[in-house]
Image (cartoon, rainbow, N blue to C red):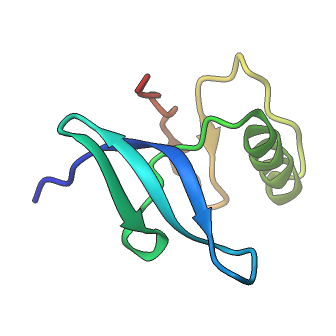
Amino acid sequence: MKWPLGVVVETFSGNDGVVRSVKLKTLKGMVTRAVQKLHDLEISDAESSQAKREALQDVHGKGLSEESSHVVTRSGRVVKPVIRMDL
C-alpha cells in the first residue's frame, strides 16, 4: 500500500474555530483533504520538538542530549533515531 506524501500549505477552520480541512502540496499538485484522512509522519515545528523532548524527559526521568544516538526504553529495547524528510 502506497500513500501519497504531502506538506500542509493552508488550514481551514470550521465555525467553532477547530481545523477541519487542509490544503496539501503533493507531487501531483495541490489537494484539499479532511483532517480525519491525514496522518502526520513528522512535525517540523520547533515548539513541538521541544514539547516532545520535555515529554521524553518526563517519561525517562532524565534529559536527552542531541549527541545521543539512541534511547533505551524501560523494557531495554533500543530506539533508532528518526531520519527526517525534507519536503
Given the current orientation, which residue lies at the most extreme top position?
67
- Please tell me which residue lies in front, 86 or 60: 86
Compared across the picture, whether 36 is left or right of 27 comes to right
Q: Is residue 79 above or below residue 59?
A: above
Given the current orientation, which residue lies at the most extreme bottom position?
16
Given the current orientation, which residue lies at the most extreme front position?
15
Compared across the picture, whether 41 is left or right of 14 comes to left
Quadrant position of the N terminus in the picture: bottom left
Compared across the picture, whether 49 is left or right of 9 comes to right
Q: Is residue 86 above or below residue 33?
A: above
Quarter holding residue 74 = bottom right
- Please tell me which residue lies in front, 7 or 72: 7
Quadrant position of the C terminus in the picture: top left
Residue at 22% over, 34% down: 27
> Where does the image place residue 85, in percent across and percent down from the top left?
41, 27
Given the current orientation, which residue lies at the most extreme left position?
1
Residue at 44% over, 52% down: 23
Q: Is residue 17 above or below residue 6?
A: below
Residue at 73% over, 21% down: 66
Residue at 59% over, 23% down: 69
- Please tell me which residue lies in front, 18 or 58: 18
What is the tally of numbered marks visible in this picture? 0
Compared across the picture, whether 58 is left or right of 80 comes to right
> Where does the image place residue 22, in percent across and percent down from the top left?
48, 58
> Where does the image place residue 30, in percent across and percent down from the top left?
31, 44
